[in-house]
Image (tube, coloured by chain):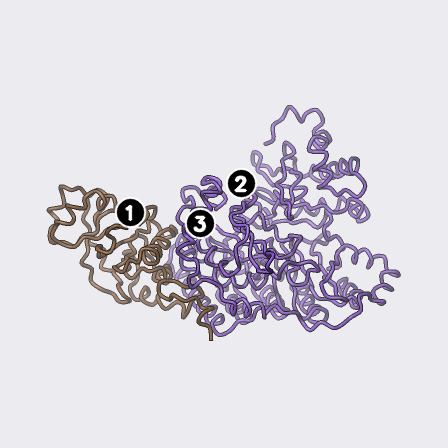
Chain colours: A brown, B purple
Amino acid sequence: METRQMTNKLIKDGAAQPDSWYLQSSGLTAESLPALDGMDIIVPLAFWLAQKSAIQSRKGNTGVWLDSHELPAALADDIHAIPVIALNFPEFKDGRSFSTARELRQRMGYQGEVRAIGDVLRDQLFFMRRCGFNAFVLRDDQDMDAALAAFNDFHDAYQPAIDQPLPLFRRRQ
Amino acid sequence: MYRYDQYDHQMLADRVAQFRDQTSRFLDGKLSSAEFLPLRLQNGLYIQRLAPMLRIAIPYGMLSSVQMRKLAFIADHFDKGYGHLTTRQNIQFNWPALADVPDILAHLAEVEMHAIQTSGNCIRNTTTDQFAGVSADEVEDARAYCEIIRQWSTFHPEFAFLPRKFKIAVCGTRQDQAATQVHDIGLYLLKNDKGEIGFRVLVGGGLGRTPVIGSEINSFLPQEHLLSYLDAILRVYNREGRRDNKYKARIKILVKETGVNEFREKVETEWKVLKDGPLTLTQDEVERCRAFFHDPAYKTLPADSATLEAALNKDVLFASWYEQNIAAHKKQGYAIVTICVKKTGFAPGDLDSDQMRFIADIADRYSFGEMRITHTQNLVLADVEKDQLYDLWQSLKTHDLEADNLGLLSDMICCPGGDFCSLANAKSIPIAEAIQRRFSYPQLREIGQLSLNISGCMNACGHHHVGNIGILGVDKKGEEYYQISLGGSADNHTALGKIVGPSFSQDEVPDVIEKIVQVYQQHRDAGENFLAAYNRIGMDPFKEALYGNKADDKQAD
């Protein structure tokens, strides 16, 4: 089992921020949960589904992370009580989590933090934000200033998305 | 044609700046090759055998004379003076320097052109029939819908990292010339009995290693739902398309493995969330886009042209070009001209910069300053007065553009092949030329309508699966061999060709094609074209002619 503070490269709501969350690997077991008391942790989906009562009674906030092949439907019953849902990019070319983010926001109406984790690179940030991510844990080697600038790569966009619910064709002047 | 407003211009300027930054980070070593790869591909930039290749989008094949002159400028200043028309109505340059590409994109942006999403695992250039809007027999002009799809698909935030590339074709003409059924999504424009416009939606077509004809998942999608339905299809594909194996990652495999009915249900489920939402097309937007494709200022002309009749009577060469390369126009007194870019001795679909400038000039003079690229790698001047056809033809001769073989065996679709492409197993351009040289023009005319498509590898850029005769370059113990298939077609009755038998060496190919043609000539009924004859007599006579008794002993390889 691995308890890992994420990099010090968190961008949240458009600014660099310190990170209070600890990401738990898929090796997390129920027995090791008490040792994490008082910490804010993000646990794997399978663990979250299997240990709901243990999670509810623990001290500290608990979020959940989904790998790119995992679907958010399993979270439906109590999704609004989850403070953070992190979506993994095992490699940046794997675009499934873009759809998962939109599904969380659009279909499930999730209002909490949607966090991008894994292979999170500067050149994907603009699209991630459009799909509903509002927190981004950059890969270690990424430059924070360049990443912050990436959100301004484009002035506008054609499609409706989470950041702009109307397509350009309904807004053109 | 469509003209950019301030929003379109700004988006393109932002893209150029973004790619300039990405390229300089790559050249400075701050961006790895692996990370730069999808970024450059999404700007149409490949690294080929000898140099980078830049593929520039020609949205649904429409090109203005101003844009064509810019392509000529780019050919001269950044390349070796020529470009190559592709089967997706794009143009490729084979010799740009990587460091120059941001400047090339800036030049293109000046004329409302780009290389956005011409490659990579994203939604590619939307294509259509080259006769859209001028065909004498059309359901509806597809171009407004192509432009609507172009905007929706450009920088779509959710679908920039799909499992694999994604191609959409829209067809509004009755005779499909867009190979619509072998696209990831094929859309046929329809009108219902109330006169409302909608689409028949096919999904999961494609060529490549596993050729598949698309399956219908919606028989009539009302036009206002076009984008929400496309979004739903793409979301299902993005979530569920295979990512474990690049060769099984196209949507055609997902549709096959899921089953069409279940796939349709998945799309419907996603669509419920999106339907009637903000993506629903407004009548204003449809009208706005339509207005860009209004008819040019046609003159009122008589149906017949005395000038034309006189020229046809006195000049047989002109008459044969006219017979082969001219199609009926919806407007009386006008004709649709196809410039066949398949003259023997020239690489199929290649244009040099002089030809580009010349074509821009004649488009200005004869066809309202616009032209179209076809998926068969030819060029169309869509609005030429019949009175002016003879003048036009005479000037085409000055630039080697008078080829009168449109639709004949020598009008081949041909990929760049092993001469340029790092994926190719075998060369294709020399094969095309050897076949062209084998047949005289009278022979070609006598053989009649016949499509011959050549791909240098199984990625099938040359659409060999849907050629009446298909030629595929294969690697046989390090040697270049060619596998022949018969019976393919890319029209309304799309069919995939069947492999005849064991492959042939490069030297044997012209003989093989000649034998195939002879079998057709021996067996055909009066007026029966190659495909119809093949469908009637089947494979056996061809097999017999090519392999004799050996045919039964050897397996296709």
Q: Position of residue B255 (x, y in %)?
A: 48, 43
Using the image as rendered, state which of residue B254 and residue B381 is in the foreground. B254
User: The residue under label 2 is which amino acid type?
Assistant: Thr
- For the image, the number of numbered tags is 3
User: The residue under label 1 is which amino acid type?
Assistant: Ala
Secondary element under disc 3, as helix, strand or loop, is helix
Q: From what the image shows, is residue B463 above or below residue B382?
A: above
Per the model, the C-alpha gap separating discs 1 and 3 is: 20 Å
Q: Quadrant of the N terminus of chain A?
A: top left
- Would residue A65 appear left or right of A152 to someone viewing this image? left
Chain identity of mark 3: B
Q: Position of residue A19 (x, y in %)?
A: 20, 59
In the picture as drawn, the residue positioned furthest to the front comes out as B194
Chain identity of mark 1: A
Quadrant position of residue B475: top right
Do tag 1 and tag 3 residues touch (Cβ < 8 Å)?
no
Q: Residues within 10 Å of mark 3 (few under 14, many from 20)?
A: many
The answer to whether marks 2 and 1 sit on the same chain is no
Disc 2 versus disc 3: nearer the observer: 3
Q: Give the label on residue B267, or none.
A: 3
Q: Position of residue B542 (x, y in %)?
A: 71, 33
Using the image as rendered, state which of residue B334 and residue A18 is in the foreground. B334
Per the model, the C-alpha gap separating discs 2 and 1 is: 35 Å
Q: Position of residue B92 (x, y in %)?
A: 57, 58
Using the image as rendered, state which of residue B30 and residue A116 is in the foreground. A116
Q: Give the label on residue A74, or none.
A: 1
Residue at left offset 74%, top offset 38%: B533
Secondary element under disc 1, as helix, strand or loop, is helix
Q: Residues within 10 Å of mark 1 (few under 14, many from 20)?
A: few
Secondary element under disc 2, as helix, strand or loop, is loop
Q: From what the image shows, is residue A58 above or below residue B195?
A: above
Query: For mark 2, what is the residue?
Result: B210
